[in-house]
Image (cartoon, grey):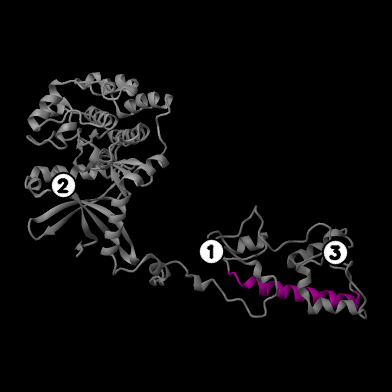
Amino acid sequence: MAKKDGRYEILFKLASGGMATVYVGRARGSMGFSQLVAIKEPHPHLLDDPQYRKELVAEARLASLIHHVNVVDVRDVYVASDDVHGKQIRLVMDYIEGASLGELLVAASRAGERLPVRVVMRVILDACAGLHAAHELVDEKGRAVGLVHRDVSPQNLLVGVDGATRVSDFGVAKATAMATTHSGSLKGKLAYMSPEYVQGRAIDRRVDVFAIATVAWEALAGKRLFRGDNDVDTAQRILSRDAPPLSKEVPELAAFDDVLETALAKDPNDRFATTQALASALESVAQARGLVAGHAEVAAIVKKLAGQELESRRAHVRDKLAGEPGFISLMSADPPSLPPSSGAPSLSTTVVDAPAAAPPAAPAASAYGSAEPTTSDTSHSHPAGVPKPRSLAPVVVAFLALAGGAGIFIAATHKTPAMPAATTTTHETPAPALSSAPAETASIAPLAPSHAPSARPAMTAPHVHLAPTHTGAPAASTAPTSADPPPNPY
């Protein structure tokens, strides 16, 4: 049964580690909004310390400021009530469908193989990019935060089904510009900690350089680097034992020895200053040998090694949400009505239904505005930003067309002088022959004696003036021009 905490809902447990338990959950909102998220809950014994709780919330707030393609976003921090442990602090993060680098390494080992070097290089380069974005973080006032991850490990590098790698678990990151780490508290996995961190000395981004280099060495060699039989043994190895050359385990990768030796130096002053510098050195060596995969190649490895587990998770999600309306039913449902906003006219006050007897010119109007003439009179009568009535144009055009036809018929009957060309342009409905004849004779060119039968059809079919068939210069158009587009009523 799903467990709900306000706008968040826990569906099932995904993983549990030394620091926290991660669940697959769902964020819910109004109007049927729903999205899968990852919900991380630190273990209760850690939250018993008030200082830890304070640091956790502060650091999660800082982590939420990081927005990078290679970083898992921290969306929210909230307090939930637990029947066993009482109040619990939970972190809400993006749910990445994929597998951690640790899971991929284990799956490859069980299959009796190592991850392809090309794939490992792409994963490490992506991770270095995400870490560098975190290290460069500034606050709202532009001040450097000095954020350090402190828990870079294969378990916290999530490789998605899209082939991109994202650094996760910034909820336990450290802002070195703030207070120092709480005494006696080492956050992260010991086997990836740098010597200065193990010794309790001041730390900066170079502890993450050491950690990601350790991850790279292990992923390429297919074995652990510093991990011992217990924590004490592991710490001693980190402090006193140099990392062996990668070529000792994989001779064909000797080109990476110098780069990894620098990144794994005991003294932070001897290391690369940034993960970006480390990535640049690794990429230079790998690119020269064609050892950097694209994301599509990485995605294929994820599908091969973790496809069955991912499908099992999808089935679990479908089972938990079986009683919920699906995407198709939500998309076909009518949206809820909203009250009209004050101070602004609603669409119903400006849209008028077209009359049934509208002339053929009416279809020129579209959903983006009416096909009104772009004349100076029209533009002044409709200020920018005010929607124009869309269906009055066909009525006006029909009226002007009828008036024009009647005027021509009367002029022919009484043999009145021709109307000046400037007068005809105010109706925007000149006869077809007007545009190809000189201005002095344009108005009398289409006239015919009153007894001629050809004068009658102009009154019964006035719309012929809107679609001239002559080959001369085009008549005044009723469609908007590219230089003066119609206003957007939305």
Query: Helix or strand or loop: what does disc 2 sit on?
Result: strand
Q: Nearer the viewer, mark 2 or mark 1?
A: 2
Q: Secondary structure at mark 1?
A: loop
Say left or right for 343 vs 238: right
Earlier-in-chain disc, 2 versus 1:
2
- The residues tagged by marks 1 and 3 sit, at their Cα atoms, a distance apart of 35 Å
The residue that label 2 is drawn on is 20
**Disc ID at residue 433:** 3
Q: As rendered, which of 238 and 5 lies closer to the eye?
A: 238
Residue 362: x, y in percent? 66, 71
Residue 160, visible in the rendered structure: no
Q: Amino acid at mark 3?
A: Ala
User: Around disc 2, counting alpha carbons within 10 Å, would you say few (fewer than 14), some (14 to 19), or many (20 or more)?
Assistant: some
Which residue does the image show at 15% across and 42% down from the upper left? 55
In three-dimensional space, the C-alpha distance between marks 2 and 1, rounded to whole angstroms, equals 52 Å
> Please, what secondary structure does the residue beneath circle 3 have?
loop
Quarter containing the N terminus? bottom left
- Check residue 409 for magenta coloring: yes
Which residue has dot 1 on it?
A: 489
- Mark 1 and mark 3 lie on one chain; the one further toward the N terminus is 3
User: Residue 338, position in %: x, y?
Assistant: 39, 70
Highlighted magenta segment, given as a residue range: 389-415
The Cα–Cα distance between marks 3 and 2, rounded to whole angstroms, is 84 Å
Judge from the rendering whether residue 77 lies leftward or rightward of residue 66; answer left or right: left
Magenta span contains residue 245: no
